[in-house]
Image (cartoon, rainbow, N blue to C red):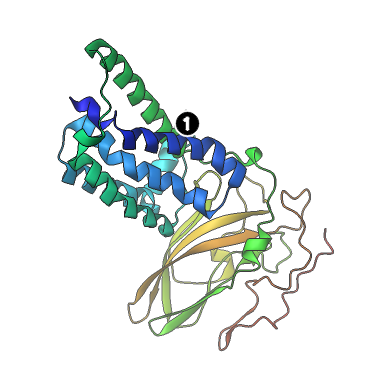
Amino acid sequence: MKAKYLFNYFFLFGLFLLILNDHVLKAAYGNWFTGKLSDVAGLLILPMFLKYLFSISTKRSVLFTIVFFVFWKSPFSQFFIDSFNAVGLYNMGRVVDYTDFIAFLILPLSIYVLDNIEKFEIKLPRISFQKIATNSLLVLTILTFFATSKDVDVDDFEPKNYLSVCCYTEPKELNIGLGSIYVPTIFTPDGNGINDFFQISADSNILRIDTFLVFNQFFGDTVFSATNITDIIPTNGFDGVVSDTVAATQYSYQIFVTSVDNVKVQVFGEICALPCEMPLNIPVPDSLENCAFPIQYDVINGYDENIDSQEDLNCF
């Protein structure tokens, strides 16, 4: 009976863990571990779920799981997410973070369970009960997968000091072929002409920015998208305006860059926006001296923390 692919100890444990983590643990202990735990639980049970639905081989169910997860965690799925959210029935989201691929380590366990499913099967008493229980579990699983794809509402959490992340993280300075780039950790979209835009800085050996994406970390939607940027200047970057407003928050970004010698590199990370406006949804920082601003870049020497950021806290 196909029900064994759902009614086994590992599937039920993985589903329980997924529900517990998404609805309890993330809210109470939101951190790196709980962020990865849902991915691990989801990848454990997805091949079993697929094998139940389509009666396919273990190899194909695992292969589809890998392909789907790679697609889902890449920028290429953003068009699908944005199109789906535009309907307005459900707010789907995810954050592009390639460290989530560590969850693939659970797949050998999933394969082992599928290859030895009879050892872990939970026998159901009657055929009529089996149908009711299986259909109920199927609906619960689908709803759980949808809930996992929905990022939490910002109002569900107390404000966090994102600057403790951005301003205590080293800015990115990368050599790309013959060229080099600098990516700041913070910008201030307050319209005063200083550090207003989030944009990489690059020397003359960087040919173009192929794709420049900025994502809302809470809802996963794209807030800025640009392609084929050959004039790498601040005003061709992200101005921090989303739905006609600016907010003090943290964004994720993904940038694809090509050098003049045709070396292509993907850069991803987080950037903080700190507009000089009230009210703030994050605690006011004690100091900005550890932050790396766009203006603190010299084309010869790269990032220089001694360059005056021309930012202060007086506006707060």
Residue 33 visible in the displayed image: yes
Foreground of the two, 242 or 293: 293
Q: Circle 1 — which element?
A: loop
Q: Residue at x 22, y 36 (%)?
A: 119
Q: Is residue 133 above or below residue 42?
A: above
Q: Amino acid at mark 1?
A: Tyr
Residue 64 visible in the displayed image: no
Number of disc labels: 1
Q: Residue at x 30, y 46 (%)?
A: 68
Outermost residue, top direction? 128
Q: What quarter of the picture does the N terminus occupy?
A: top left
- Give coordinates of residue 250: x percent, y percent: 61, 55
Outermost residue, right direction? 314
Foreground of the two, 204 or 127: 127
Q: Is residue 185 above or below residue 149?
A: below
Outermost residue, front direction? 119
Foreground of the two, 68 or 254: 68
In the image, is 112 to the left or to the right of 199? left
Badge 1 density bin: few <14, some 14–19, many ≥20, Cα 10 Å: few
- Give coordinates of residue 296: x percent, y percent: 65, 78
Q: Residue at x 65, y 75 (%)?
A: 295
In the image, is 219 to the left or to the right of 295? left
In the image, is 128 to the left or to the right of 226? left
- Name which quarter of the figure residue 102 lies in: bottom left
Q: Is residue 150 above or below residue 232?
A: above
Residue on which disc 1 sits: 90
Q: Residue at x 30, y 21 (%)?
A: 134
- Give coordinates of residue 81: x percent, y percent: 42, 42
